[in-house]
Image (cartoon, rainbow, N blue to C red):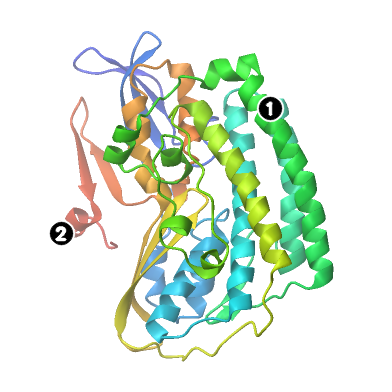
Amino acid sequence: MEAQTTTTGKFVVPIGPQHPALKEPGHFEFTVDGEVVTGASVRLGFVHRGIEKGTESRNWTQNMYMVERVCGICSHVHASVYAQGVEMLAGVTIPPRAEVIRSIAAELERIHSHMLWLGVAAHEGGFDTLFMYSWRDRETVMDLLELVTGNRVNYSVNLLGGVKYDIDEKMSDQLKKGLDFLDTRLHHYMKVVTTDETFIGRTKGIGVMPKDEAYMLGSIGPTGRASGVEHDVRVDSPYAAYKQFPVKIILDDAGDLQARFVVRIKELYESIRLIKEMLDHMPEGELTVKVPRRIPEGEAISRMEAPRGELFYFIKSNGSDMPERVKIRTPSLCNWSSITNYAVGHKLADMPMLLAGIDPCFSCNDRSVSINRGGDKRIDWTWEQLRQYGIAYYR
């Protein structure tokens, strides 16, 4: 789309849904005065796949594979939080060894996600050397995930009632060796993001979000913690192995784009420490317990800390072998308001890195639709309103 002038004389630059700066489709409109952004809006939902509705026509086990497809980078945590909710409804507790293996896979996934993000964010700022190096080293953690699970993206570690795969002594040694290599590389990346003058010029003081405003906007995950928001589900409500292996929360009070880089890299140090500690103190025992095919009637809320922040599932059972409702709230949805809020006052050239700074997942976010009637008239509709007026068939 081409830039256009509104009826009020403002100049609007549209970005997306197809644009070189976007790795997934989204539509942004930036109102500018010269090079300075004076207003911003976002339109999501271009990759809506109806996964929530799809879960209602599949049994509890089949949905394990369905929810893994919500996000390829966070596939394990989606399956884990879903399994945790179903296990709560079924009244079963998985074996301690299975809890540790789930948590190890979750931390490996966090390393994978943050290293992928580091490369993408660097690329948006024009630092292609950092992009290529971080993605080269990302292959190491993908190889480790493949070693344990046989897969590099959708790992399928979980079963209802436990996990599929065990970690033996040989695997443990290989995991530690790979993590030692990554630890060395991550210290190099930390040096780059905190000392390179060009990098600092593109990140320091950009998109500053104070702690009180981060709370007001509901920012979560590394985006919120970079502004001092003390919220991490692994710390606040420990689950799986985090009850036995406490997590040290990573915080920064700068609240700018550079702080979001620093927090994510420091979180990787913590993930490496956690994995090594879990491997050294792996409990003995079984990997699974039996879960009934028909889950007792009831409702459950399940939460876990995904790489991008708190992942929330509401699961409702009517006593059959299929769920009546699965509601998913992904962390990216909570962080979008910080983009539209803090784009104002920055230069248009800062927008790609600001967008990448929250580590957005576009395919997780179809919750509303905007209807542009021309000029400056725009209406934002929720799915409830669309269904009420017969426009949408799915909530």
Residue 18 visible in image:
no
Residue 294 versus residue 118 in the image, above or below? below
Residue that badge 2 annotates: 388
Residue at the location (41% across, 37% down)? 228
Residue 137 visible in image:
yes
Image location of residue 259, percent across then percent down: 51, 30
Q: Is residue 103 left or right of residue 224?
A: right
Residue that badge 1 annotates: 191
Q: Tell which residue pokes out farthest to the left in this image.
A: 389
Quarter of the figure that contains the C terminus: bottom left
SS of the residue under disc 2: helix
| Callout 2 crowding tier (Cα within 10 Å): few <14, some 14–19, many ≥20 | few
Label 1 vs 2, first from the N-terminus: 1
Residue at the location (51% across, 80% down)? 61
Asked if disc 1 and disc 2 are in contact, CB closer than 8 Å, the reply is no
Residue at the location (54% across, 81% down)? 94
The amino acid beneath tag 1 is Lys
The amino acid beneath tag 2 is Gln
